[in-house]
Image (tube, rainbow, N blue to C red):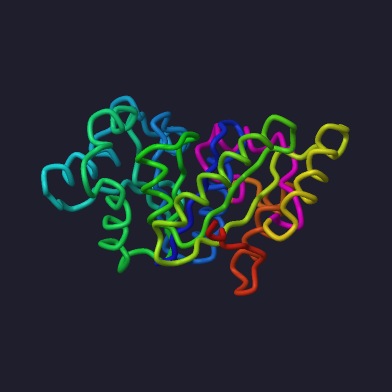
Amino acid sequence: MKVWAVANQKGGVGKTTTTTSLAGLLAQRGHSTLVVDLDPHGSLTSYFGFDPETIEPSAYDLFARAAQGSSDTIMLRPTAVKNLSLLPASTALATLDRQLGARSGMGLVVRRALQALSGRFEYALIDCPPMLGVLMVNALAACDRLLVPVQTEYLALKGLERMVHTLEMIQRSRSQPLPYTIVPTLFDRRTRASVESLEELRQRYPAQIWSEAIPVDTQFRDASRQGLPLTVVHPWSRGSQAYRRLLDEVLLPEAPAQAVAHE
């Protein structure tokens, strides 16, 4: 199983949209795909029609059972998309750092869970919370590739700086390098701020940034109302075509991604 995490230490940059779009494309291409919601806000869970306030079991149970030394069967939810399953989030995930964050072994819970599912899925995509804590640490420990969506506006550049710093810290505890790709999102070529922000991203991170950008596309909202990836609802929209090109590039062995160097 190939595991990709989608993360940034800033909200509203397109993490859930990136997760659903790429997972939808993989599923459409016949790959058995799992999406994992580790964000206590549960946007990915809500996207597919489930309520993170009430859903049980959820990703929270992985941690609760691990703390008790249990390794029960992981309960997944089917989605309306063929070949695509969901491990949902519950709002209880917000309590994990306080309840279990200091316990030994809590940083590898998701990795172990995905290893147990490796025979069922070819790909797993993890939607991460926008803050550093036990959940993001789990995602970065479990993944073999990281995608960092960054909105093309000035404030998002600061969030990216924090994310890169976090990667440098996480890298020290990993046995394998963690390649990552910066994905510019919500790009609006009509605005000066968007164009200049994209140019600054390319200047700061020339080796890590994807060569294109995900455009602003109002059809993303229509897809979310239907609870389906845009790539399923409107496969030839601007947004879908951009994510298709991104996926093709990520799947290339020589995809433009850099491992975070040790300091």
Please state the horizontal and vertical placement of residue 232, each as a whole percent of the image: 58, 50
Magenta segment includes 161: no
Q: Residue at x 44, y 49 (%)?
A: 126
Q: Residue furthest bottom?
A: 253
Magenta segment includes 212: yes
Q: From this view, report whether residue 143 is shown above or below residue 36.
A: below
Q: Split into 4 quadrants, where in the image is the N terminus?
A: bottom left
Q: How many marks?
A: 0
Q: Split into 4 quadrants, where in the image is the C terminus?
A: bottom right
Q: Residue at x 61, y 64 (%)?
A: 250
220 or 72: nearer the viewer:
72
Left or right of 250 in this view: 130 = left
Please state the horizontal and vertical placement of residue 148, each as a whole percent of the image: 59, 48
Corner quadrant of residue 11: top right
Corner quadrant of residue 255: bottom right
Q: Residue at x 47, y 56 (%)?
A: 171
Corner quadrant of residue 123: bottom left
Please state the horizontal and vertical placement of residue 209, each as a whole percent of the image: 70, 55
60 or 87: nearer the viewer:
60
Q: From this view, report whether residue 156 is shown above or below residue 174.
A: above
Please state the horizontal and vertical placement of residue 155, each as a whole percent of the image: 69, 29
Left or right of 143 in this view: 18 = right
**Which portion, as a residue range, is magenta?**
209-231
Left or right of 152 in this view: 31 = left
